[in-house]
């Protein structure tokens, strides 16, 4: 069910709260009129430009580098390889307390050898990017090929070529989860379903390529990095250690950022390089990636092979589940998330929103000669949901049950919350069953089945697919420490200040890259503080704004930043009540603060926040000494654990039996994201994520050959969905009992990419079920579908 905005009552007048309303985004006027300020828009006096000579070898030892010709070119200021920088930088390592984990060093340029095509080996710094690019033609690098490590299933073998000899293995991380007696459960199962599932590699493909600009001030000995990152705090902390600089002299600013989808959530070697060169040369240094560089060197994801088996009783009750996963983590363990981020979450979330009493999950994260695997919208759950939901549909077909009925039987129910999963994740409460019913009602599931039967009688290949999932969002410190990473991602700070004009500035450690956080957080503060929405300014993406922050990722900002905003607003509102009571000459207990005014319900008198601020700062005599402290409050919020966001997706597709193209006729999402701050922003996030999930299901794939050469190095070859591929997406908002965190918010920005691939895979499988076939590999391109149907062609 859907609830409207809450109501506030002021002086017996009903006032609509901001939270829950479709507030137009505060960011849009500048972004839509071309007045946004991205990193590449910054042009500082004396600025230099970087071009990188990148490896064309997937795995090779660097024998020699000759750069004299490049250095001699007019306009070239410096040409450097790792040997030129070694004394100025310390390696960054994504450490972890996980057993069987091997960290790898992160350097600004390749050291001794290269491990993937696209790895930066030499940097040319020049007066313009054109000169730097031209000079790269005069850089000569001699390599000794060491043998590609491109296939993760071969890379785990004992005799495989090693990418990191010091690790002694290509398996950078290995974990295992056990609960119950899986072997006994499988032996007792009336039906067992198993398969090998493959989800191919993706790239985030943000509209704005990665861009960095470093500006070192020699007089002040300060360094400012403008970075297209979603994690400025993470970057700052890592750079402070790598460069040996005090954090008080280092500032990282993420201005407007044109999308991330996880790809801008990690530290990259290029960020280290521009900082080093700016400090060395005493001039600003900028690098802007081109699209080919972005495709080759930005972190990638979803590269998993899963062998899974599901055992069920004759009535459809799940008895046991096993999953053995090999995750292709690329050449390095990315900072700070480690090589375990994606593959470990695949097996962690495999049971999903279902009751699975007996489970065995094993995962190996395997190094290969490819760009490192890093965060990508959904992190692990698109793969685990794909596998589990395919197993559920395969089981339903084997049992002769409707897929909806099998899910109804096994989804966790209201009375079972809080529910501890087989790997120890706790679902606090969420609308697992309600989302299933809401999505099916929203798309008219029963009528669709009737339409499908009629269409099939006419020879049409029509399929209906469902996918249900659960994700952990708004993770607090108790959960974020479990991987043993070098950072704390479980807290957020809000610094709230009311200045002498009554303007409200709220500063956070988050960094928006398209989520509309300036609007959503201002809505929360407007209600909690009682200030006018128009008077609130949100500061984010600047490490000088708050003492600590890590950024925006993992569906955390609404929960953690919203909670911090509430904690900071409440005591500040009490201060406003005391000031208002003194100026209105009434009892502070009765004063109400809302919509920018403090009011006395008994007399109807009121005074604006700007007038109270003026009295405090500029007319001190009007207030007693005990009320004259500055109007500011800083609070940190830690929800400790996390909260369960859930959803069900339903898709109906049709396959052209001549071209094997897939057309999505209808699509509906029912999602429980708790208390909705701004339905318009939530709807935009859902639709955008579903579009991305459709790309993952049908089009997008980073293809490497057996030598580790990237074959999809441009947008001619790497296909992203366009408007004709995206159907109208219906959205059903489900609000069950709200989570116990401050505000009752749940994260929801990743759901579309989690649910869409599985729903579409099930729909396509349903469409070709008459051929005795199903989809176990994504994306389902026309070529792949043709080969599945015609294996001997």
Image (tube, rainbow, N blue to C red):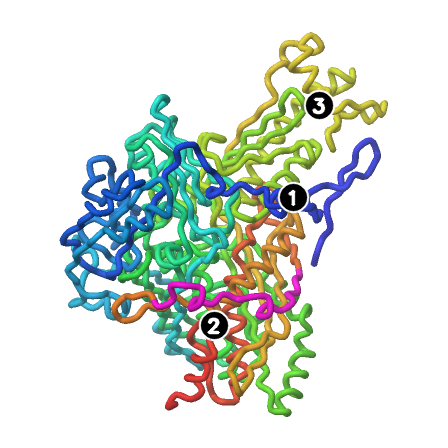
Are dots 1 and 3 in contact, CB under 8 Å?
Answer: no
Q: Is the residue marked by circle 2 packed among few (<14), some (14-19), or many (20+) residues within 10 Å?
A: many
Q: Please give the residue where the numbered disc 1 appears in the rendered image.
A: 29
Could you say where residue 389 lies in the image, as x and y percent from the top left?
Answer: 49, 71
- The one nearer the camera, 787 or 85, is 85
Q: Was residue 42 drawn as part of the magenta stretch in this picture?
A: no
For residue 87, side relative to residue 289 (left or right): left
Q: Was residue 723 drawn as part of the magenta stretch in this picture?
A: yes
Tag 2's secondary structure? Answer: strand
Whether residue 465 is visible, yes or no, is yes
Could you say where residue 617 lies in the image, as x and y percent from the top left?
Answer: 64, 15
Residue at x 67% of width, y 83% of height: 451
Residue bounds of the magenta highlight: 711-732
Precedes in sequence: disc 1 or disc 3 = 1
Which of labels 1 and 2 is toward the front? 1
- The one nearer the camera, 348 or 611, is 611
Give the spatial CA distance, label 1 vs label 2: 51 Å
Q: Is the residue marked by circle 1 packed among few (<14), some (14-19), or many (20+) residues within 10 Å?
A: few
Q: Which mark is residue 610?
A: 3
Which of labels 1 and 3 is toward the front? 1
Q: Quadrant of residue 88?
A: top left
Image quadrant holding the N terminus, namely: bottom right
Tag 3's secondary structure? Answer: helix
Prevailing SS of the magenta stretch = loop
Residue at x 58% of width, y 35% of height: 538
Q: Which mark is residue 318?
A: 2
């Amino acid at each position: 069910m859907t609830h409207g905005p809450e109501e506030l009552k002021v002086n017996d007048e009903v006032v609509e709260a901001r939270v829950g309303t479709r507030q137009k985004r505060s960011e849009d006027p500048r972004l839509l009129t071309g007045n946004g300020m991205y990193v590449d828009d910054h042009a500082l006096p004396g600025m230099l430009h970087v071009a990188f000579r990148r490896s064309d070898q997937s795995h090779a030892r660097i024998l020699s580098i000759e750069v004299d010709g490049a250095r001699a070119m007019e306009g070239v200021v410096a040409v450097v390889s790792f040997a030129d920088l070694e004394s100025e930088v310390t390696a960054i390592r994504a450490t972890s307390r996980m057993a069987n984990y091997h960290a790898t060093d992160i350097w600004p340029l390749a050291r001794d050898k290269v491990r993937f095509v696209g790895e930066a080996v030499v940097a040319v710094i020049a007066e313009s990017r054109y000169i730097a690019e031209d000079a790269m033609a005069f850089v000569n690098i001699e390599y000794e090929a060491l043998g590609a490590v491109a296939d993760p299933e071969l890379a785990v073998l004992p005799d495989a070529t090693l990418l990191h000899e010091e690790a002694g293995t290509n398996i950078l991380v290995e974990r295992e989860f056990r609960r119950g007696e899986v072997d006994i459960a499988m032996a007792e199962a009336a039906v067992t379903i198993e398969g090998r599932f493959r989800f191919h590699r993706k790239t985030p493909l943000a509209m704005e390529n990665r861009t960095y600009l470093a500006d070192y001030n020699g007089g002040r000995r300060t360094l400012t990095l403008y970075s297209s990152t979603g994690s400025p705090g993470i970057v700052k902390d890592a750079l402070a250690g790598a460069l040996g600089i005090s954090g008080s002299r280092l500032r990282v600013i993420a201005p407007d950022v044109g999308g991330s989808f996880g790809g801008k959530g990690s530290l990259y070697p290029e960020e280290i390089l521009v900082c080093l060169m700016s400090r060395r040369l005493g001039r600003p240094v900028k690098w802007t990636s081109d699209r080919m560089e972005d495709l080759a060197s930005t972190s990638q994801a979803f590269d998993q092979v899963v062998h899974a088996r599901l055992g069920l009783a004759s009535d459809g009750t799940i008895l046991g589940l096993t999953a053995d996963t090999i995750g292709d983590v690329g050449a390095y363990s990315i900072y700070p998330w480690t090589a375990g981020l994606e593959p470990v979450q695949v097996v962690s979330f495999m049971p999903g929103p279902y009751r699975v009493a007996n489970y065995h999950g094993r995962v190996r994260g395997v190094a290969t000669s490819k760009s490192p695997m890093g965060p990508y919208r959904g992190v692990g759950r698109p793969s685990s949901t794909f596998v589990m939901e395919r197993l559920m549909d395969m089981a339903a077909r084997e049992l002769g049950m409707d897929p909806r009925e099998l899910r109804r039987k096994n989804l966790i129910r209201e009375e079972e919350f809080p529910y501890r999963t087989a790997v120890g994740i706790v679902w606090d409460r969420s609308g697992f069953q309600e989302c299933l019913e809401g999505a099916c009602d929203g798309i008219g599931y029963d009528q669709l089945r009737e339409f499908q039967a009629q269409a099939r009688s006419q020879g049409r290949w029509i399929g209906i697919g469902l996918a249900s999932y659960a994700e952990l969002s708004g993770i607090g410190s108790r959960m974020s420490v479990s991987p043993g990473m070098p950072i704390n991602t479980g807290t957020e700070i809000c610094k709230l200040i009311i200045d002498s004009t009554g303007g409200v500035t709220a500063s956070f450690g988050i960094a928006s890259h398209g989520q509309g956080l300036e609007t959503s957080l201002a809505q929360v503060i407007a209600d909690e503080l009682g200030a006018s929405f128009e008077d609130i300014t949100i500061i984010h993406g600047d490490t000088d704004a708050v003492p600590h922050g890590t950024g925006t990722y993992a569906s955390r900002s609404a929960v953690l930043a919203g909670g911090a905003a509430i904690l900071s607003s409440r005591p500040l509102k009490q201060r406003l009540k005391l000031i208002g009571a003194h100026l209105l000459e009434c009892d502070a207990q009765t004063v109400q603060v809302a919509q920018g005014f403090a009011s006395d319900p008994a007399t109807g008198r009121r005074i604006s926040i700007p007038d109270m601020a003026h009295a405090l700062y500029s007319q001190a005599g009007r207030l007693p000494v005990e009320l004259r402290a500055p109007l500011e409050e800083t609070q940190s919020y830690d929800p400790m654990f996390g909260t369960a966001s859930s959803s069900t997706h339903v898709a109906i597709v049709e396959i052209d039996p001549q071209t094997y193209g897939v057309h999505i006729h209808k699509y509906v999402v029912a999602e429980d994201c708790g208390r909705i701050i701004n339905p318009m922003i939530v709807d935009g996030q859902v639709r955008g994520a579903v579009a991305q999930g459709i790309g993952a299901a049908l089009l997008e794939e980073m293809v490497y050959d057996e030598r580790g050469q990237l074959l999809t190095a441009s947008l001619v070859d790497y296909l992203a969905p366009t408007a004709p591929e995206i159907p109208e997406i219906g959205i059903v908002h489900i609000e069950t009992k709200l989570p116990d965190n401050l505000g009752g918010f749940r994260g929801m920005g990743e759901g579309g990419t989690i649910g869409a691939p599985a729903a579409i895979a099930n729909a396509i499988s349903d469409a070709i079920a008459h051929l005795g076939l199903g989809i176990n590999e994504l994306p389902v391109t026309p070529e792949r579908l043709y080969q599945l149907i015609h294996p001997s062609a």
